[in-house]
Amino acid sequence: MKQATALHRAEDLVRERDKVKRVVLAQVKSVVGDFVEISDIIVNNIDLTQELEKSIEDKVVKEQRALAKVFEMQAAQKDAEIVLIKARAEAESVQIRGAAVAQNPQVVMLEAINRWDGKAPQTLMVDRAIIPVFPVPTTLSAENATK
């Protein structure tokens, strides 16, 4: 047992217990030969110093944290790719709509008509100047009608 375990690092002994067990079983079978048939060896406990166990545990925790960071980085990369794809699709959509309006300017008027809510406009745009529109009363009061 000591011969087989001496070839491995302590953390490998803990992680790869089955592999170590197979190596030990093969070595024992070769030493014993045909005198005794050995079918299995049970490795219940591998005693290590507390410092060594703590060191192995710390290393495993650090490796898991590093793997978690790699996963987070890959997820962030995928999220960025999705945002980029959406932005490209939106830019292409704007470009297509702009080309359609350039080819047929009446589309803008049709869109305005389709969105009209039936109320009179509050402002007008004439030569890039915004002019407020004042509401005109639809009924005249008796006092205004006599003037």
Image: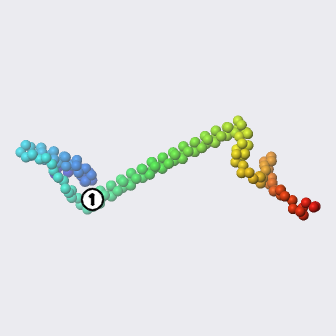
What's the image's color scheme?
A: rainbow
Residue occupied by mark 1: 53
Residue in the foreground of this view, choosing between 26 and 146? 146
Q: Residue at x 83, y 56 (%)?
A: 138
Amino acid type for the residue under numbered disc 1: Glu
Seen in the picture, residue 53 relative to 79 is either above or below; the reply is below
User: Which picture quadrant has residue 62?
Assistant: bottom left
User: In the displayed structure, does residue 5 sit left or right of residue 145?
Assistant: left
Residue located at (93% from left, 61% from top) = 146
Name the residue at the top extreme: 103
Residue drawn at (75%, 53%) of the image: 119
Determine whether the residue tagged by mark 1 lies in a helix, strand or loop.
helix
Left or right, 78 with reference to 125: left
Q: Is residue 17 visible?
A: yes
Residue at the far front in the pictured view: 142
**Does residue 32 appear left or right of residue 17 in this picture?**
left
Spot the residue most to the right.
147
Residue 66: x percent and y percent?
A: 39, 53
Q: Position of residue 78 (x, y in %)?
A: 48, 46
- The picture places residue 11, in percent across and down from the top left corner, at 27, 53
The image quadrant where one finds the C terminus is bottom right
| Location of residue 135 in the rendering, given as x and y in whole percent from the top left corner | 81, 56
Task: Count the labels in the image.
Answer: 1
Q: Is residue 9 visible?
A: no
Name the residue nearer the viewer: 32 or 79: 79
